[in-house]
């Protein structure tokens, strides 16, 4: 017996929610990697400069 709800509609909505959630997580991860990568690059450059001065 159906009560007017189509399970395909609910699956489609769930899929969209999961896709949006994965996209949000990806943006957060990429932003964090970019920030940490920039800091790490600066520290390696500083270390390289100090080693070359020896």
Image (spheres, rainbow, N blue to C red):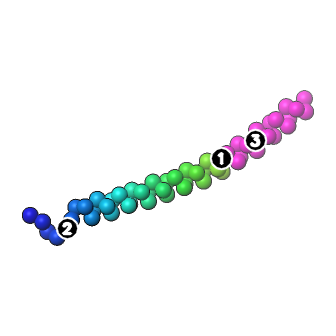
Residue at x 55% of width, y 50% of height: 29
In the picture as drawn, the residue positioned furthest to the top comes out as 54
Q: Which of marks 2 and 1 is in front?
A: 2
Residue 31 percent location from the top left of the image? 60, 53
Nearer to the camera, 48 or 9: 9
Residue at x 61% of width, y 47% of height: 33
Residue at x 42% of width, y 57% of height: 19
State the extent of the magenta-drawn residues as a range: 36-54
Mark 1, other Cα within 10 Å: few <14 / some 14–19 / many ≥20: few
Say whether disc 3 or disc 1 marks the residue closer to the N-terminus: 1
Say whether disc 2 or disc 1 marks the residue closer to the N-terminus: 2
Q: What residue is pinned by disc 1? A: 36
In the picture as drawn, the residue positioned furthest to the right comes out as 53
Q: What residue is pinned by disc 3? A: 43
What SS does tag 2 mark? loop
Which quadrant of the rendered structure holds the C terminus?
top right
Residue 16 percent location from the top left of the image? 38, 61
Mark 2–mark 3 CB contact (< 8 Å): no
Q: What residue is pinned by disc 2? A: 5
């Amino acid at each position: 017996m159906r009560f007017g709800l189509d399970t395909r509609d609910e699956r489609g909505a769930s899929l969209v929610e999961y896709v949006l959630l994965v996209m949000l997580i990806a943006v957060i991860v990429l932003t964090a990697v970019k920030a940490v990568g920039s800091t790490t690059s600066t520290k390696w450059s500083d270390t390289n400069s100090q080693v070359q001065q020896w």
